[in-house]
Amino acid sequence: MQRIDVTLAGLRDLQHRIDQKQLEDGDWPLVSALVSKLIARTEARQERMIAKIQSSTAADSAVAANTAVDTELPNQDGLANPTPVESAAAAAGSGGTGAITPSAATGQPAKEKSKGHGRNGAKAYANATHVLHSLAAGVIGMMCAACGFARMSRYREKIVIRVVGQPLFRAVLHHFEQAYCRNCGEIVRALDPNSVLEGIGSSYVTYDWSACAMLIVMHYFGGAPFKRIESLHAGWGIPISDANQWRVVNASDDFLLPLYKALERYALHKAINFRIDDTGSMVIMLRRQIQDEVAALKAMGESTRDVRTGINATGVYWETPDGPVILFFTGRHHAGEIIDQLLQHRQTSAAKLPKVTDGASKNFDHEHAEKLIEATCNAHAFLKFEAIKDKYPDEYAVAGRIYKAVFDFDDEARNLGLSPEDRMHYHRKQSLPLMKELKAMAEEKIASKRVEPSSLLWEPLSFVVNQWERLTRFCEVPSVPLDTNLVEQTLIMPVRYLAGSFNYRTIDGATVGDHFMSLIATARANGVEPVAYLTECLRCHEDLAQRPDYYLPWAYRARLEAAAPRGDPAFEDSG
């Protein structure tokens, strides 16, 4: 290729003439060189992908040849070994259509779920006050006034639920009578119950533990800014300044820090797998720090390309034997770096931990990669096809059909209660052939050069080819999730906070927010009401500091279930 000497200013002048459609005779050699370079780069990308496909095809053929005999080994009866799901289906009899349902595993007829009446029963109002309205004396047992024949007998209660508006926080003013000695200045005050001073604050204003928990949930889960809560409560005649609100949540974080550390420690050492992803965030102190770094480099005439300008909120969804744990981290980092910070505390003798994330290369760059089994989110792969469905409906239809079946198989495995190993074998038989069909379509279109790197279809097809081993890891390793949907759903909390409160002011503020979002999200994921949970943890903060594991969400839930009354029909329906 002929080398053409041209300056950046010359290229910008050329761009201007192209925009104005006023090319000169001397411009055509340069245009030709630029187009030739673009063609060469496109051809190189295409050839690299074709070579990768050919290499992968040869490797797959060799593996298939080596394993063909193993997959056909007979059992003692001379038949091929059935999968766990086939065994479950066989137990249901041979007269069916072959569809696998939860009832097939148990041999019991499937029960249709009742549609319900579309309203909450009285049992859902767990924290409501109960008021009993009794019949007049003698009504039970008296002659019926309507028919005059039978006597009145006891019938089930009628429950009417009355919802009353009130402020988020209720203030109680305690008036203490005092006596004063004019001689020495001694002041004697009426004795006060200990509950008056329980909570966070001073001898003038004290915020009860329940108020602290409510404020934490409203701000970090509801996304309501401190200033908005202050204005809202001023209308109710209960002033709560934004400065006082920050002091309350900051002090609460000190009390609950042992619980957060216990949660993080439990997730790291007990996790079965985890999902991780990032979303954008804003910390004013970090933004100013970034701007100062960029300005300093520009002043020295140096490049600013290596300055990390992104501020992320990273969410990690851990699956553990007792329940999910959700942790958040905000700062100048990406998901891969957060995992490295955590994995350095994981035992070296522990088994490798399956991790699922999107296909971004930064999420697979680890110092502790030997402790992980990497997998890629299949939902991200499908969304790439969905993004171009208007221009490429046929390819989208193929991907949609395949992924619908794969996710349906995963639901069936969950409904059947299959173990992680049995689920893996089930997917290997049912889902892997479908995934291979998707890969074959991608490889054929790329290898035949019917799709070029400049095409919109190139991205989803090349994603399937490049990420193939990670996309199908759920067929090779037990407990590997199909997607990152659960962590994507939890990231709504920092997104909602950013939309409502706009930013954190300091790094300390972001850290406090991460702690509380982690506690709230984990409580909700384990079926625990967060206000009551945080109230209990704050009230027992001294005991919590000594044995934080006793206050983990699943332990708290177990105590509630053990203490709850059972079999009371009055709370099954609102009547």
Image (cartoon, rainbow, N blue to C red):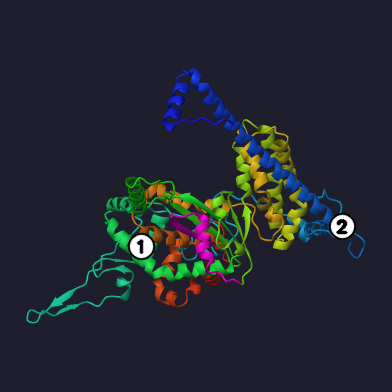
**Which element type, helix, strand or loop, lies under badge 2?**
helix
Image quarter of the C terminus = bottom right
How crowded is the residue under tag 1: few (<14 C-alpha within 10 Å), some, or many (20+)?
many
**Which element type, helix, strand or loop, lies under badge 1?**
helix
Is 333 contained in the magenta span? yes
Query: How far separated are the C-alphas under marks 2 and 1?
Result: 64 Å
> For this view, does 466 lie left or right of residue 21?
right
Q: Quadrant of residue 180?
A: bottom left
Residue at (40% x, 73% y) in the render: 541
Q: Which residue ends up furthest to the bottom in the rendered image?
A: 184
In front of the other: 443 or 246: 443
The reply to whether residue 71 is in sight is: yes
Residue labelled with disc 2: 69
Residue 195 spot, x, y in % from top left: 33, 73
Rendered view: 105 above or below 391? below
Q: Nearer the viewer, mark 2 or mark 1?
A: 2
The kind of residue tagged 1 is Val
> For this view, does 6 lie left or right of residue 371?
left
How crowded is the residue under tag 2: few (<14 C-alpha within 10 Å), some, or many (20+)?
few
Going from N to C along the chain, the mark reached first, 2 or 1, is 2
The reply to whether residue 155 is in sight is: no
Q: Which residue ends up furthest to the right in the rendered image?
A: 78
Rendered view: 424 above or below 462? below
In front of the other: 144 or 372: 372
* Segment tinted magenta in the rendering: 325-348
Residue 529 spot, x, y in % from top left: 48, 61
> For this view, does 74 lie left or right of residue 549?
right
Is 34 contained in the magenta span? no
Residue labelled with disc 1: 249
The kind of residue tagged 2 is Val
Whether pointer 2 and pointer 1 mark residues with C-beta atoms closer than 8 Å, the reply is no
